[in-house]
Amino acid sequence: QVQLQESGPGLVKPSETLSLTCTVSGGSISSYYWSWIRQPPGKGLEWIGYIYYSGSTNYNPSLKSRVTISVDTSKNQFSLKLSSVTAADTAVYYCARLLMVYAHSPGWFDPWGQGTLVTVSS
Amino acid sequence: EIVLTQSPGTLSLSPGERATLSCRASQSVSSSYLAWYQQKPGQAPRLLIYGASSRATGIPDRFSGSGSGTDFTLTISRLEPEDFAVYYCQQYGSSLTFGPGTKVDIK
């Protein structure tokens, strides 16, 4: 079955750019939507954005100015960049497959990666 | 943006008891576009329910979802030891938002 694995630095300095990659195994990244979600320590879940394998994207309006999600189908990977980070961006970052209700209408997340903690600190 | 509110914040129950979790939306969620997830400490969320009442693959039938409009419910008919966790609802009728979660802990 499809499995996802996040990778990237666990520590990022304030004002710098957070960069993470999600590797998809057990299936092709093609024909699906893929998403990033984050969870600050001890808090709830926040959707960051999603990308179609073709490269089209949609971002959470609250983060849109700082987020870029890209895809590399040759490596079966997609990536997240979040610029100008602050301590408020400290969170566990999850990647997940986003299932669609119907064409281009986002639905639910399944499966999820195990998550990676990113701490923003100098 | 549709804001989801979950209640109670914490539900203290014993194994074998019935758990009823509520998720309320600030406006009607179109076509019952609501999902439920279970999250255990140190783990990623796991999909339980989508479309308000459809169980995901491999989810035991003691988990059931119901509701429409602004009021949705997740019911666990008889709590097993592995069901003590945090449960989140998520709507996808208008963008994508999550509720704050309900913790089900052992009484």
Image: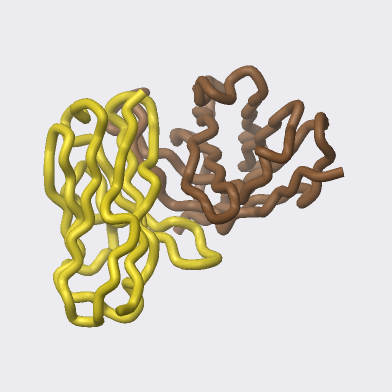
Chain colours: A brown, B yellow
**Rendered view: B23 above or below A85:** below
Q: Residue furthest right?
A: A122
Residue closest to the eye, B61 or A55: B61
Q: Residue furthest top?
A: A65
On the image, the x and y values in percent for residue A82 come to 69, 30
Residue B81 appears in which quarter of the rendering?
bottom left
On the image, the x and y values in percent for residue B66 come to 13, 49
Q: Please give the name of the residue rendered at 54% of the width and 33% of the height, measured from the top-left corner.
A: A48
- Would residue A46 be seen by someone viewing this image from the given angle? yes
**Rendered view: B7 above or below B29:** below
Residue A21 appears in which quarter of the rendering?
top right
Left/right placement of residue B74 relative to residue A91 reads: left
Q: Please give the name of the residue rendered at 50% of the width and 45% of the height, measured from the top-left corner.
A: A96
Q: Please give the name of the residue rendered at 20% of the width and 66% of the height, measured from the top-left corner.
A: B19
- Would residue B62 be seen by someone viewing this image from the given angle? no
Residue A74 appears in which quarter of the rendering?
top right
Q: Please give the name of the residue rendered at 58% of the width and 25% of the height, measured from the top-left corner.
A: A63
> The N terminus of chain A is located in which quarter?
bottom left
On the image, the x and y values in percent for residue A55 come to 57, 23
- Total marks drawn? 0
Residue closest to the eye, A105 or B76: B76
On the image, the x and y values in percent for residue A6 come to 64, 50
> The C terminus of chain A is located in which quarter?
top right
